[in-house]
Amino acid sequence: MKARHALAASAAALWLLAGAARAAVEVSEPWARATMPGQKVAGVYMLLKADRASRLVGVRSRAAAAAEVHEMSHAGGVMKMRKVEALDLPANRMVKLEPGGFHVMLFDIARPLKPGERVALILIVEQGGKRVEVPVDAEVRPLLPED
Ligand SMILES: [Cu+2]
């Protein structure tokens, strides 16, 4: 038991020395929608689960000139999108980024996203007053006509 405590203490010390907080956000099933020729924007979707109250406050990607968190909503039969400055990630609750809801929007993509390729993103998450970066590797999936 004592040895285990010592181990935990040294792990904590290393963590402090490194100065890089480990993000307590679990990312699952990240995917990006394949784009059509000439299309300059792309949507990226995933499931997020934080083990403590956190907020998704930004995204960046080398694949695009800019990336934002967006929310899609229906207003009088019209689909609208707006930028979300901070998306709450409540502790231990799954937050879905999915078509028709929250998503990451890539702007001015460098080249078309083809099925089977991968897109790397960095999520910027605020956690206990600190900003941590969460890497995401999203698989590009085919565009489906119905969505
Ligand atoms: Cu959008």
Image (cartoon, rainbow, N blue to C red):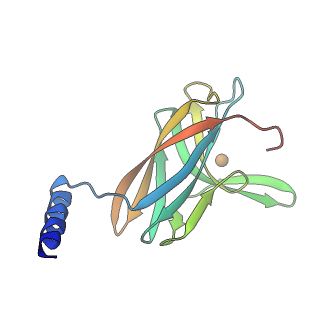
At 48% from the left and 59% from the top, the residue drawn is 56
Residue 4, image x and y in percent? 17, 70
Q: Is residue 112 left or right of residue 125?
A: right
Compared to residue 146, the image places residue 3 above or below, namely below
Quadrant for the C terminus, please. top right
Q: Position of residue 61 (x, y in %)?
A: 47, 38
Residue 100: give x, y in percent of width and height.
Answer: 73, 54
Q: Quadrant of the N terminus?
A: bottom left
Would residue 85 be visible to someone looking at this image? no
Establish if 16 lies above or below 81.
below
Residue at 18% of width from left, 61% of height from top?
11
| Residue at x-position 62% and y-position 53% | 70
Residue 15 lies in quadrant: bottom left
Q: Residue furthest front?
A: 1
Residue at 19% in and 64% down:
12
> Could you say where residue 54 lies in the image, as x and y percent from the top left?
44, 67
